[in-house]
Every structure is written in structure tokens, then in C-alpha cells.
Amino acid sequence: MIDPQYRKDDGHQEIISLEGNKIKGIKSISQIDPKHFWSNCAKNLTWFKEWEQVLDWNPPFARWFLGGKLNAAYNCLDRHLISEKKNHAAIIWEGEDGQSVTITYNQLFYRVNKLANALKRLGIKKGDRITIYLPMIPELVISMLACARIGAIHSVIFSGFSSQSIIDRVNDAESRIIITADGGYRRGKIVQLKKIVDEAVKQTSTVEKVIVVKRTHEDIDINEKDIWFEDLVNKESNYCVSEWMESNDPLFILYTSGTTGKPKGVVHGSGGYLTHLFNSAKWVFNFVPTDVFFCTADIGWVTGHSYVVYAPLMHGVTEIIYEGAPDYPDQGQYWNIIEKHGATILYTTPTALRSYMRYGNDIPNSYDLSSLRLLGTVGEPINPEVWMWYFNTIGKNNCPIIDTWWQTETGGIMISMCTGIENIQMKPGSGTFSLPGIELEIVDDHGKKVEANKKGYLTVKEPWPGMLLSLWNNKERYEKTYWEKTRNSYFAGDFAYVDNDGYYWILGRADDILKVAGHRLGTIELESAFISHPSVAEAAVTSKKDEIKGETIIAFLVLRKGAELSSQLDIEVNEHIKNTVGPIASAEKIYFVNKLPKTRSGKIMRRLLRSIVNNETIGDITTLEDEASIEEITHELQEINKHL
Ligand code: WTA
């Protein structure tokens, strides 16, 4: 059934009449004339100047709404000030300690403006890069929107990453400013964010100022470049004019793991990205003004950028932002927050759900979850048992489940049931269908479409508005990573298949990227971190299936000549990983071996290691250089398993 709103608001009436009664849904409308379709979708945003051209497709570079001028912060804030939303809650922030703060759209507007003025006073101009390294506190949203308001490009770094990750990202983006906090809370403990930034700043040459938010109020070192956030914004006025950004000017860089040691700076613009977000949120979540949306993602990852910051604020809904971990202060924290604030939509990860399921039903059953109307998942495949548990125990058989597939690179949701368009039969574990305007295909190694039920690579055939503009400073890597393998279509890096009913099933990554508790990490990036330990000469990282986290990290290390194998070495090496990459990257198990399995051309055979650690059959090893390494690793694992 088509939502009648679409015909009126989005101008789809015109296209429907082209084909008379034959066209049933907006999906077919989007296929007949995608440019017209997306330009109607773009009209849901506020533009200062309309675009001259809907799409310039110069493969593999897509530029949407060329010549159009808009501002992302204006679309999230100013446009609500002339409606009844002005004094509605934009953010309900829940601290780890149970403290709640509500910020209205009007208040958020002023706070963003003040910081925008302060950044300008520090000499920041359109196109300058600002790194944001903050915990999940309102200042994180305020900082992103302040950058967007003045046209500065934000680069948010997840606050669970350590100093080396900051150094790499700040240097690649050549950021002029870092916005951080004295510290953050994690399960009641203080994470000394400022100290981590101080270490990083020593190894960067572009940072002029470090703006520090007071969160933990601890004593910290104050250096020459440091300024307190509060002192900076207090003297500024409440209004800062929005910069008119061309639709394809970069809005942000978000670094994500790839298949090399260096993270990729994914670049998104405003016009296409925000069009994709506004409309995907409308179709998938079917936002209504009374919604209280709870997306549990950390803003440091793309889900937080798209569906904590930009999409819900553009829609003017109320959203909950939670500072802490799902199991802190106790194992019912999400359910407590839902009851306390009357959340209507929960959008979370399979990892969080798997943990909650393990804690038992009594905990969620002791909370009033009746405000919920819709449940969502993102970031990893969800196993059917967990899906059923979510549906029965949390949704009480009343809430549809949307399993949304997408990526940092796609900007917004690509596959999901769209409750704002039609209700279809759900299949636990399948994301169902692609969104309107998104043309997918499953192909083989030669780029040829595979039949139903056959595994292949998931690709996107046509450009879509949320598509990344490029990789920061690295066009060649952009072309090579996403467009070389499957020719003429975007290579997502996931295996998938379509069943007889046309439903999509995602089967996991086809490359060397891991998803540990939903966090995206590159094996090669982790291996470089292991090798930076003085005792380690070579490293191979793979993953083992895990009941809670989906996957966990397993490392095989070869020691340097002369390095001594002590009983404490694995702990020491893991500490090193936590300090260089971050606690999320610590290995579940480290094995010290004499040789790594490599191909004759010297490539580590990680897939083979994965088969061994997961007790799966080892496939073709004809390209293996030295079969002895496999024997050694298998033997090693058997020995270890004997002692478990
Ligand atoms: C995986 C997260 C199965 C997939 C938004 C993808 C999923 C990668 C799903 C992107 C899902 C995301 N079912 N797998 N519903 N959603 N993935 O960039 O492997 O952090 O390529 O973006 O997560 O991870 P990223």
C-alpha cells in the first residue's frame, strides 16, 4: 500500500499518472525515472538555492543535486524554529550515572550557534577540518552541527580508539582543531580522553587548538593549545549565519577500516547524503511527531552520524542519547531507559541483543516496554533465535522488526523493510528488500548476475544519493576498492543471496574486514598494530565465531629473533593493542607460532586460519607455500584445546 502522503508531498502523483493504474508502489516509480524520484525526495529538505542538475554520473563519481545550496545544521535546527517543534525536546540525554538532561530544538539551536561563532573566532573557515573525540554527551552533537553550520568538515573519532588512531586520522585530514573532553565514563570508570589526545597531539603538526569539554571534572594537564569549551562559548552570541554549502561540498570525513593497514577517510556531502537520510528514515522508521527514538549506536560510527545526529533531527523527533554501556549500571539498562523516557522505537545491534538474551527474560519483563512500536537492528547479521527473542520478549509480538543493512560508504540504509510504505511478511534473519531507488544485484567473480539462492557478491548497480563522494585525498583507492572488482557496479564487500521470494540474506564479509561486537576493524590494520610491539616480527589476524560478539579477534604471532616467550607476553601484547588501537581491538586469544601460512607469493592465508580456528573444513591449499605451517598451527590449537 502506498502511503497517500507520498503522492501529495513528494510530487509522485505526476509519475503515477504517467502509467495509469499499473504502478503499485513508489518502488516501481523510482525505477521508471530515478532522477525525478530522487529530486522529489530532495524537496523534503530546505534548500537555499535549488539544484541545476539532479545527477552528474561520471563513473565512479556521482554528484547529486549539482549547484544546489543548503546547510545540514539549518536542516536539523532552524527549520523547526518556525513550527511547534521549536520547544519540543530534541535530545533526552541519559548519563551513565542516571542523570537526565533534556535539550529542546531551540536550546540546541543556540548552543550550536555559540560554538559555531567561537570556531569562526578561532579562524576556522569553510572546508577546514575539525577532529572531534568526545564521549556520548550532547557536546558531541553540538560540535558536529557547529562545524556543519560554518562549513567546516568534521572528522569524528570513536572515543574508544587510542592515540595512534587519532594520530593517523588527524594527520590524514590535516585537522586544525581537536574537540575533546577531560574524560569520559565507561562502566563507572574514567577514561582519560584528554591524556590520550595530549599524546597524539605531540605527533601531529596541523593542530592549532584543543577545545576541552568538562565532563569528569578531574585534574588534567592544561597545555598551551588548550581552551575550555565553556569559556569559549560563553562569550559568543546566539546566532551565527549558516554557510551556503554546495550539495557536494564535504560535510564530514569518517574513517573506517578497509583491507589495508591504513583506515579510509569516507567523505560524504550534504545534498545527496541528507536526501537519502531524510527519506530512508521516513520509509523505514515512519517517524511521527510523538516518536521518542532510541538509537543506541555510538556517534563515532556511521550509524550514530546518520541515525543519531542527522536523520532524527531533520525530522524533528525526540531522541534519546545514552552515554554508557548496555550492561551498566545493571543488565537492564536499555529497558530502564525505554521505560523512563517512553521510547517508541529502539534501533540497536545484534551484539547488544545477544547479551541481553543471555541475561534472561525476567529482567526485561520487569520493565514497562509498552511504549515501543518498532524495533530495529543494524551492523551485523542477526540470528533467527535472537530475532524471535527480540520480537517476543521485547516487542511482545506487537512490533515489526526492521533488519537494516548498510555501510559507512552507503551513507544510509539500503536494505530494510519499510514500515512507512507497506507492511510485508518478515523473515527472521533477512533484511527483506532494497529501499526505493536502490538497485542491487548479486554477482559472481566475473560481475555476472547469479541466480536465486546462489551466494555471490552484493553490489549496487546504480548511483544513489547517500553514496560516498570519494575517499579523502585518495581517489585511486576509492576507484580500486569499490569499483574494480565487480566492474561498473559498487562492490559492497559482503556475500549475500536472494531467495525465491526476492528477499536479501547477508552472509558476512567477503574481504579482510571483521565485525567485532558490531565494530568494524581491518585485519591488516590490527596486524600492523601487533607488529609495532618490539617482540613481534609477523602477525596474522583472523576471527572466531562468538555467541555474543558475532566474531572475536584471534592473532597468530611470530616473535622476533631474540625475543623471549614468557607466560606474560600475550597479556603484554594485548595491552599494547589496547593502547595503540583501543580496547575494542584486544584479542580473544593470541597464539605464538614459528611460521604463518602464506601463499607462494607471500600473502597470509587468513581465510585458512579462520577455517582452522572455527573447526571448519580447510578448502583449497594448493597455493600454500609451506604446508608445515598448517600442521604447526593445527597442532598448536589441538594442544591448547586439550588444556581447556
Ligand atoms: C555489516 C554499519 C548483516 C556488513 C551500518 C557491512 C550487516 C558492514 C548489516 C558495514 C545487517 C551492516 N546484516 N550485516 N543488517 N548491517 N552489516 O560501515 O558486513 O560499520 O558491510 O556500517 O556491516 O559496517 P559499517
Image (tube, rainbow, N blue to C red):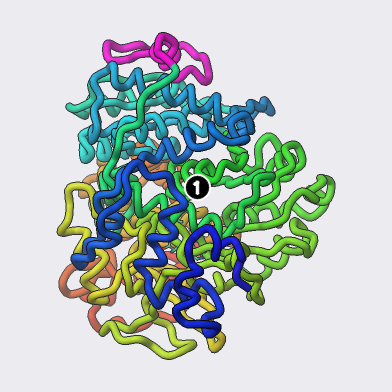
Percent of width and height locating residue 78: 47, 33
Determine which residue is flagged by label 1: 311
Label 1 within 8 A of ligand 1 by Cβ: no
* In the displayed structure image, the side of residue 421 where residue 112 appears, left or right: left
Label 1 sits on what residue type?
Ala
208 and 521: which one is in front?
A: 208
Q: Secondary structure at mark 1?
A: helix
> Looking at this view, is 166 or 627 the one in front?
166
Is 214 covered by the magenta stretch?
yes
Measured from the top left, where is residue 607 in percent x and y? 36, 71
Tell me: 270 left or right of 6: left
Residue 86 within the magenta-colored segment of the rendering:
no
Q: Position of residue 277 (x, y in %)?
A: 46, 53
Quadrant holding the C terminus? bottom right
Q: Please state, as top left, top right, bottom left or bottom right, where the N terminus lies in the image.
A: bottom right
**Residue 148 occupies which quadrant of the picture?**
top left
Residue sitting at x 69%, y 28%: 98
Quadrant of the image occupied by residue 99: top right
Residue 398 placed where, x, y %? Answer: 77, 62
Vertical placement of 43 versus 95: above or below?
A: below
